[in-house]
Image (cartoon, coloured by chain):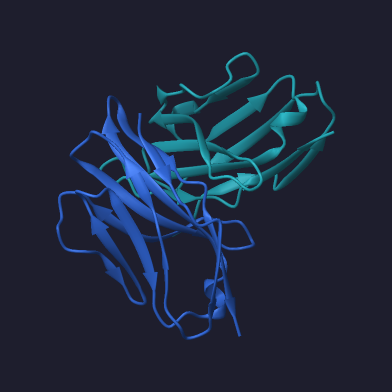
Amino acid sequence: AQTVTQSQPEMSVQEAETVTLSCTYDTSENNYYLFWYKQPPSRQMILVIRQEAYKQQNATENRFSVNFQKAAKSFSLKISDSQLGDTAMYFCAFMKHGTGGFKTIFGAGTRLFVKA
Amino acid sequence: EAGVAQSPRYKIIEKRQSVAFWCNPISGHATLYWYQQILGQGPKLLIQFQNNGVVDDSQLPKDRFSAERLKGVDSTLKIQPAKLEDSAVYLCASSLESTGTQYFGPGTRLLVL
């Protein structure tokens, strides 16, 4: 069975600095997708970034980038130039294509505080 | 483009009562998901629909939870009877089958007393 582990329950960063959130996963699949979702205090989950496992190039979205290490089964999120609005819960998610469609597993989340 | 809609936003009930949640996905999204998110945890998938068929309900407590997706669009999730441990946020999400990226609604916060 697939598992997703986020080993940092809480992190804090000073505004304008860089922070990295870690995520490891366990799977025997070769083709899958990885995601980082953000859940602000208002609780609506928002996609931050996604990575297809077959792509070697790390995904980037403006200030957000990932370090995808397939062999190590690691998928960390780097937030550059942190802003107060980045304060939220961040969830790492793994998705595989099984019978009937995609199956998603979320990690327990990392609560990020951006300090002014 | 309208997002995923859910109602109600909040619900307080007593244990052993029944409750129902409604979700309207993004237009054209074939896949619909219901998640349970207990405070301090990540979302747990309860059920996944592809159009109006169930493709995964392995973590749905079928003795008390039920869900349907009529005509492959709107969906309802029902709990009958509710238990204290059902207190959680119930999230609905939808996706285009081919991409897998999920778009979430605002959730329904359920408190069972």
Q: What is the quadrant of the N terminus of chain A in the image? A: top left
Please identify the quarter of the rendering in which residue A57 is found. bottom left
Judge by depth and name the residue closer to the eye, B102 or A113: A113
Measured along the vertical axis of the image, is residue B52 above or below residue B87?
above
Q: Residue at x 55, y 25 (%)?
A: B67
Q: Position of residue A59 (x, y in %)?
A: 25, 64
Q: Position of residue A112 (x, y in %)?
A: 55, 66
Asked if residue A17 shows in the view, the reply is yes
Measured along the vertical axis of the image, is residue B101 above or below residue A26?
below
Q: What is the quadrant of the C terminus of chain A in the image? A: bottom right
Q: Note the chain letter of the cyan one.
A: B
Q: Left or right of B110: which side holds A49?
A: left
Q: Residue at x 63, y 48 (%)?
A: B40
Measured along the vertical axis of the image, is residue A13 above or below residue A102?
below
Judge by depth and name the residue closer to the eye, A87 or B89: A87
Q: Colour of chain A?
A: blue
Q: Left or right of B109: which side holds A100?
A: left
Q: Residue at x 55, y 75 (%)?
A: A85
Q: Position of residue A36 (x, y in %)?
A: 40, 57
Q: Left or right of A13: which side holds B14?
A: right
Judge by depth and name the residue closer to the eye, B13 or B8: B13
Q: Left or right of A9: which side holds B81?
A: right
Asked if residue B2 shows in the view, the reply is no
What is the total number of numbered labels drawn onto the structure image? Answer: 0
Q: Position of residue A48 (x, y in %)?
A: 40, 63
